[in-house]
Image (spheres, rainbow, N blue to C red):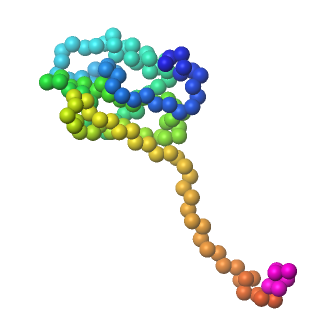
Amino acid sequence: MEGLAPVLTFQWVLGGDFNIILFGDERTGCVSQQIGGSRLFSEFLFNCELSDLGFSGPPFTWSRRKLFQRLDRYVVNSALLSCYPNSYMQHLERLGSDHRPLVLHHTSIEPMILPRPFRYIDAWQDPSDFSDFLN
């Protein structure tokens, strides 16, 4: 992946269970910290020029007993963010798994095309040169 990042200029997104936290506050209920793994994951994102998309909903995507972590995420490059600046990820309620489902929301910044108002031109009422128009 790191070898592809510099040559990829189009929009791209990676998402799913990365099985690692990025920041210390993405885990609760455990005393041990995975600083080494987090540092490597952070370096990977930096080298691939990717950034975490952020989320809405509950803060943790995975749990087991009293341990809660944010292991699932979407990461995107700047090309995607420039086309879809309002993108975000939503954590849904768990449905029988120990992971929450993720939904990627995005909207483009296409210009809004409004209907043009009807314009009436007085010259349309003048039938004198209507026959010239038809010839």
Q: Is residue 110 above or below residue 53?
A: below
Q: Residue at x 80, y 85 (%)?
A: 130
Quarter occupied by residue 122 = bottom right
Relative vertical location of residue 27 with respect to residue 87 in this rendering, above or below: above
For the view shown, which residue lies furthest in the top direction?
36
**In the image, 100: left or right of 83?**
left
Q: Residue furthest left?
A: 65
Q: Quadrant of the C terminus?
A: bottom right
Which residue sits at x=49%, y=36%?
A: 81
Left or right of 126 on screen, residue 62: left
Q: Is 47 one of the magenta-colored residues?
A: no
User: Outermost residue, front direction?
Assistant: 96
In x, y percent, where is residue 79? 54, 33
Residue 60 placement, left or right of 2:
left
Image position of 98 with respect to 57: above or below = above
Prevailing secondary structure class for the magenta stretch in the rendered image: helix
Q: Could you tell me if residue 129 is visible in this image?
A: no
Q: Nearer the viewer, residue 42 or 102?
A: 102
Res. 65 in view: yes
The residue sitting at 22% across, 37% down in the picture is: 95
Q: What span is in magenta?
A: 130-135
In-front residue for pair 99/61 = 99
Q: Residue at x 50, y 31 (%)?
A: 12
The percent coordinates of residue 27 (x first, y second) are 24, 23
> Where residue 22 sits in the image (x, y, percent)?
34, 21
